[in-house]
Amino acid sequence: MTATDPPKPAPLPLDPSIAPPGTRNFRDAGAIPADQWHADQNGETLVPTHCCFCGVQCGMYLRVDRGGKVFGVEPRNHDINRMRLCPKGINAYQQVNHPDRLTAPLMRRSRDEEFRECSWDEALDFTVSEIRRIQEAYGNDAFGLLGGASLFSEKTYLVGKFARVALKTKHVDYNGRLCMVSAAGANKLAFGIDRAGNPFSDILLTDCLLIAGSNVGECFPVMTQYLWGARDRGATLIVVDPRETAIARTADIHVALRPGTDSAFFNAVLHVIVAEGLTDEAYLAAHTTGWDEVKATVAQYPPTRSAEICGVPAEQIVQVARVFAGAGKAMAWHARGIEHHSQGVENCLSVINLCVATGNIGKPGAGYGTITGQGNGQGGREHGQKSDLLPGGRSITNPEHRAQICRIWGIEESELPGAGTSMMEMVWQMQRREIRGLIGICNNPFVSLPHYAVVKDGYDTAEFHAQFDFFLSETAANAHVVFPVTTWAEDEGVMANAEARVVKHNKAQEPPAGVRTDTWVICELARRLGAGAHFDFPGSREVFEELRIASAGTVNDYYGITYDRLEETGGIAWPCPSTEHPGTPRLFEDGRTYHPDGKIHLQVVEWHPPMDPYTEEFPLSLTTGRTVAHFLSGNQTRRLGALVEQTPRPWVEVHPSHGFGNGDPVRVVTRRGSEVFPALVTEAIRPDTVFIPYHWPVPTAANALTIDALDPRSKIPEYKVCAARIEAAEHVDEVPAPPMASGHEAYPEVQASRTDRLPPTSPQGRGTAERS
């Protein structure tokens, strides 16, 4: 390694309440050393960027050879991850030049035909002709668009603009609807802003950390360092989860509550805090509305009542209340475990009520956060691809907001459609032939949406379907047109991580011949639809400049964020209203929220049972989640050899009281159907609960069994609880290979372990040495 010539930058000033403790001397010695070094062996270069997977957004270097091809990865000493990467991050680079990559458009005029490779012109022209045919016959809203929260923010901005300006349809939504919208809804109701209140580094300063419904060790592995840092300082760790996850196993208090009972639990915790005089009455009086109503409601949830609902000891509820309220500084973070419910918004609000009632808001080491699942789960919902939002988090039903965006876009307000429906509702509308055509970008609903039979029927009923992807997903394999697009390493753009820190991804290599960026495809479709004047964007930089303008003055203000500033700083938390503004890592420090009155609007929460009722026939709870080796629908990770070897197939976790042995075939039955999985027998799960990871397609798809009930406010599906039973079976269901275009074969080295019939030796998976 050799140093480059440019002079060292000035030492970076650090606020110890923002930056991790212990980094000051390291930084002042010459900033981050890796910023001033390069590899010089064999012409190798290192391109600084961030991981494409979860909402932690770890910094990494992609290793690029003298031919301009990505061939490896190194961790980057970024503030977020400090040289750490998880198994997915270490292997992410392998998808860039993977043999399964799509490198030419695929097309067929009927699903009865095989795909054939075609030219870009033919694929684009056919798509545009189908859009026009459907809209001329059935109206503009007969065509829909579904985006994704793993796209760069520039592309999510284009998705929303393309739907409203080029397609002129109200029907646009995105797969973040399956992820963060319950938290978003709760945050907006309580605080008037949709983001975490504190940076990750505040976790290092807390005295009590509560993690609710988040398997941090597997879903956000590098975030674990912040939890360990808090423990090293002596912080108490409370984990609320039906399973004894890797993090729960090390907690001071693990609340293994019954799935679907979270708000009953948190109401009871607050009941105890009120009864024992542990609330911060001065803070509540100065900064909140609705406290009297909340207090009256939680009075109806004594520990004895909630203990019966939740299936936990009443004494544990009292213990949690005293520990959380008695801490000098306390924080709560949560994720999908409490959000994937028909009462997901209420669950999140019940955690907010707990933090606010104890005065733990807006301080170093004290606050509230939501852990985004996808890489751009935060940024992906901020700039217009969500059905009810416009750029900058504006409401599409607000006349002033509509007028602002129409001026920026250069269209008449009468041309801007109204609010559309959610992702799952759009599938139901396809079943009813209300939506007859669809474009999907960066999503795989055949694996990720609940009640697969309904999803398949909805897509099959659609008269036309086009999909953007760089691998042929299960959903793309059902389409009429598939557009081959770039991976994250072949384009540049920004994402906002779980802290709302906007980070810059850099282009590391040119895409393969025949592959285009999502931006190019969207703009070319818009041009052929006659809206090209509104989509004159050569690349991401030009889109970002319009996004900055479109967000200026809003709660989600990106105006002061530029590519150059992101390169210099490593990331800026929004809101950032000017190029002199440092960003806002921590919200509410002045005691004010983003509601006009500056108050926290506390909300009454009443618990209600899950939507799928328990009976003698279906007495158990089925819950679902991730495993460390895979990501979301698995379209990327199920093609990467090391990850497939670590976790080749799904399993069902069952308690020993059911009498199964490890590897026994167990049929899991719900009202939607049944599938057979190998048993992973463990005392780390409640006897009345079973768990299946959801990264695989039918016939091993957890989401063939889950219920498509929705939260009435957030419209998020109730993935985390449905009624089930288990029974002995003869053979486990086979794991299918990933879809391949006609004439291509699945990469055999990657799929070698897929036929392994045994469950992993632990929920976290296993290495190849442990296989038998």
Image: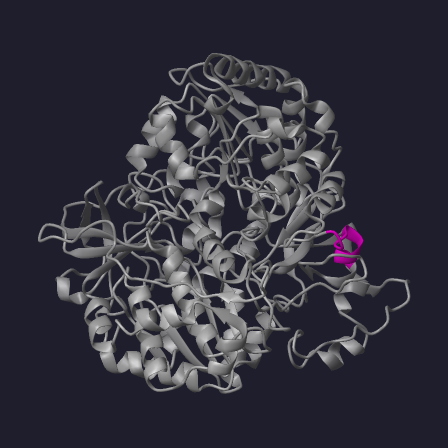
- Please check the rendered image and state whether residue 126 is part of the magenta-colored stretch, yes or no: no
Looking at the figure, which quarter contains the C terminus? bottom left
Image point (19%, 65%), residue name: 687
Counting from the top left corner in percent of width and height, residue 658 is at 14, 62
Vertical side of 358 occupied by 59: above or below = above
Q: Which residues are magenta?
A: 559-567
Front residue (pair 670, 75): 670
Q: Considering only vertical position in the picture, is 115 above or below 760?
A: above
Magenta span includes 563: yes
Query: On the rendered image, what quadrant is the N terminus found in?
Result: bottom right
**Foreground pick, 425 / 740:** 425
Q: Is residue 566 left or right of residue 657?
A: right
Image-quadrant location for residue 314: bottom left
Q: Quadrant of residue 545?
A: top right
- Would residue 372 be visible to someone looking at this image? no
Where residue 276 appears, as percent x and y from the top left, is: 34, 86
Q: Residue at x 44, y 76 (%)?
A: 357
Q: Is residue 585 found left or right of 143 in the rendered image?
A: right
- Front residue (pair 142, 689): 142
**238 or 323: which is nearer to us?**
323
Q: Is residue 233 left or right of residue 768?
A: right
Residue 497 image offset from top left, x and y in percent: 59, 57
620 left or right of 504 in image: left
**Residue occupying the point 78% across, 63% down:** 35
Q: Residue at x 46, y 85 (%)?
A: 327
Residue 228 picture location, percent across and down: 50, 77
Residue 537 visible at all: yes
The total number of labels drawn is 0
In this rendering, the answer to whether 443 lies above or below 321 is above
Q: How is the image coloured?
A: one colour
